[in-house]
Amino acid sequence: METTLDPQTQEQQSSTYANGDDPDTSDTSKADRLRTKVIQELIATEQTYVTNLDHLIRYFMQPLRLQSSKSHQKALITAAEHSTLFPSDINTIYQLHTQLLEQLIKVTQTQSQTQGDDSHNIGALFVRYGPLFKMYQNYMNNHHNAVQCLSNISTKNQKFVEWCSQQRLKCNGGNSLDSLLICPIQRIPRYQLLLRELIK
C-alpha cells in the first residue's frame, strides 16, 4: 500500500533538502572534506620529511664527512663510523622525496584549478614512485648498526655530543641526530596509513 506523507512532514523534508541536508549530499561532502584533510596532511608531512633529510645531510652528514677526511686528531669520528651512521642511500632518498614533494604540490594545484578529485592522481603518483621505495631496504637493514654506532660514539666522545648539540641549534632547535636518522624508517609506514585513509 502506498504511503502518503502528511503535508507537515513533506514540508519539513522539503525544507531539509533545500537547506542542503540531503543525506547523500551530506555524506559526499563529509567524504570530500576528509579526503582533503588527508591530502593536506600528506603534503605537510612530506614537506617536514624533506626538511629533516636536508638538515641531516647539511648539518650532520656533510660536515662530519669533511672532518673524517682530515687527520685523525682533528676528526670527531672515523671514516668507518661515518659510513655506518650515514649510508650513501641518504642522498638518493633525499633526491627522490624532493621530486615527490614537487609532484604532490603540482598535482594538487592542478586539480584545485580544475576542481577535480586529487585522490586519483595522487594514487597514480604513488603507483609510479612505489617501486623506487625499494632503495630504503639497505638503509633499513643498516639502521640498527647506525643506532648502535651513535650510542657508542656518544658514550666515549663528549666533544662529538657537544658538537651535535651545536649543530642542532643551526636547525632552529630541530630534531637531534638520532631523531633525524630514524625519520626514513618511519616514513613508509606513514604513507601506508595516509593512503588507506585516502581511499576510504
Image: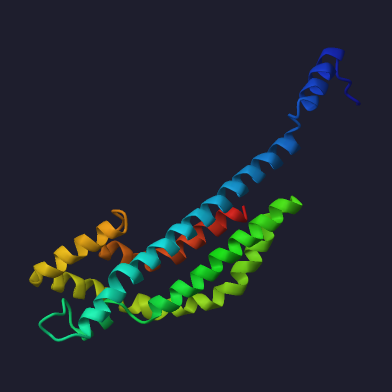
Q: Is residue 199 visible?
A: yes
Residue 29 rendering spot, x and y as whole percentages: 69, 40
Task: Residue at 57% x, 47% y: name it.
Answer: 37
In the figure, is residue 121 to the left or right of 130? Answer: right
In the figure, is residue 164 to the left or right of 95? Answer: left
Q: Nearer the viewer, residue 188 or 85?
A: 85
Task: Residue at 30% x, 58% y: name it.
Answer: 175
Task: Residue at 87% x, 14% y: name it.
Answer: 7
| Rendered position, 109 above or below 151 | above
Quarter of the rendering containing residue 9: top right
| Rendered position, 34 above or below 173 | above
| Rendered position, 16 above or below 31 | above
Q: Nearer the viewer, residue 7 or 140?
A: 140
Quarter of the N terminus within the rendering: top right
Furthest residue toward right: 2
In the figure, is residue 200 to the left or right of 158? Answer: right
Residue 31 rendering spot, x and y as whole percentages: 65, 44
Q: Is residue 143 visible?
A: no
Task: Residue at 73% x, 34% y: name it.
Answer: 23
Residue 148 rendering spot, x and y as whole percentages: 20, 73
| Rendered position, 119 above or below 34 | below
Q: Nearer the viewer, residue 16 or 77?
A: 77
Residue 33 rendering spot, x and y as whole percentages: 63, 43
Q: How many marks?
A: 0
Quarter of the rendering containing residue 73: bottom left
In the figure, is residue 111 to the left or right of 34? Answer: right
Quarter of the rendering containing residue 196: bottom right
Q: Nearer the viewer, residue 12 or 82?
A: 82
